Amino acid sequence: MSVRRNGIEGDMAGHRGFGLVEFGAASFRAGSPEEGAAPAHEVRLDAFALGDRCVSAADFHAFLLADPGAVDHTMIDCIDPCFVVHRPGGFALRPGCGGFPMIQISFWASAAYCNWLSRVEGRAPVYDVAARTADLDRDGYRLPTEAEWEYACRAGHPDGAPADPGACNGEQAGPRCQELWPGRTGVGAFPAGHPGPVPVGSTPADAAGLHEMLGNLREWCHDKYGPYRAEPVRNPRGATRGAFRVVRGGAFIDPPAALTPVSRMAAYEDTKCEVYGFRVAVPR
């Protein structure tokens, strides 16, 4: 398993607050005999890189300021407890909330951010948000495929066991995570003491150098949700039909059994809820 960490250096720090972890081309056995993750099957992946943490509210707000017409208030939910709100003059970042992950965001708003980041870094945008199509053969930023996400998570959690409930922000979050909840720190609009996400990168990185892969937020993947097949596959991209997308990793409301490298969930692509966020991927 080839992994190389690529941090934020030089001009990269000016437009994104996350680094990239690089993964070499590899084969692995995806899925498991568990219900919802069966059958286990062989997957071959080309090299890719994955954000070392989810996109923050500050990262996303920078995109909204730079390209105000790319996303409207129907693509992100700007009602409490959001970190980015919609005002008469446009979108605004709530004080003290920039380090928290961007939440209440639909799949297509996440895709719009990926397109903006691609343009900023001189890459070809992957998504046509208006047409709701994508070309993953382009070199731009995108949501990770489900297989990429699972491979990266397995690299960080090689034993495949559920995350330690006390060390990740799930339903049974320990005191360290609870102290970081916005409802405890007094920022944003989460009710006092109420569970919520922790700031991106605030929990220790896993063995692959990735933060909050398990717990905190259910992360959008590129794939449309569908059943696995037993045959070996290269660079799988999900079902060809449907409007439900794969989400992975589990959130601050989910039990330990849902916080594993193989656990799968699905969400309607226009869903906007405080338990959803995203990190980006890019081909290498």
Image: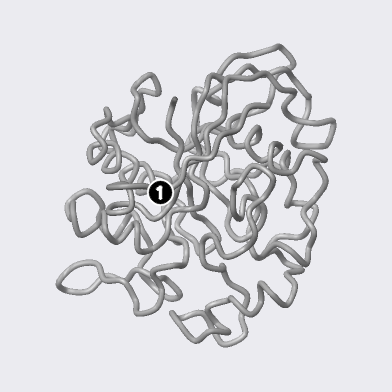
Q: Quadrant of residue 264?
A: top right
Q: Nearer the viewer, residue 24 or 30?
A: 24
Q: Nearer the viewer, residue 174 or 79?
A: 174
Q: Where does residue 277 sit, x and y in percent of width and height?
A: 49, 54
Q: What amino acid type should be assigned to the residue bearing mark 1? A: Ile
Give the quarter of the figure containing the N terminus: top right
Q: Under tag 1, what secondary structure? A: loop
Q: Residues within 10 Å of mark 1 (few under 14, many from 20)?
A: some
* Vertical order, 135 against 125 (above or below): above
Q: Quadrant of residue 87?
A: bottom left
Q: Where does residue 86 sit, x and y in percent of width and height?
A: 27, 70
145 left or right, relative to 2 = left
Give the quarter of the figure containing the C terminus: top left
* Vertical order, 3 against 211 (above or below): above
Q: How many marks?
A: 1
Q: Nearer the viewer, residue 15 or 138?
A: 15
Which residue does the image show at 51% across and 45% down from the upper left? 220
Q: Where does residue 76 sit, x and y in percent of width and height?
A: 36, 58
| Residue at the spot of label 1 | 8
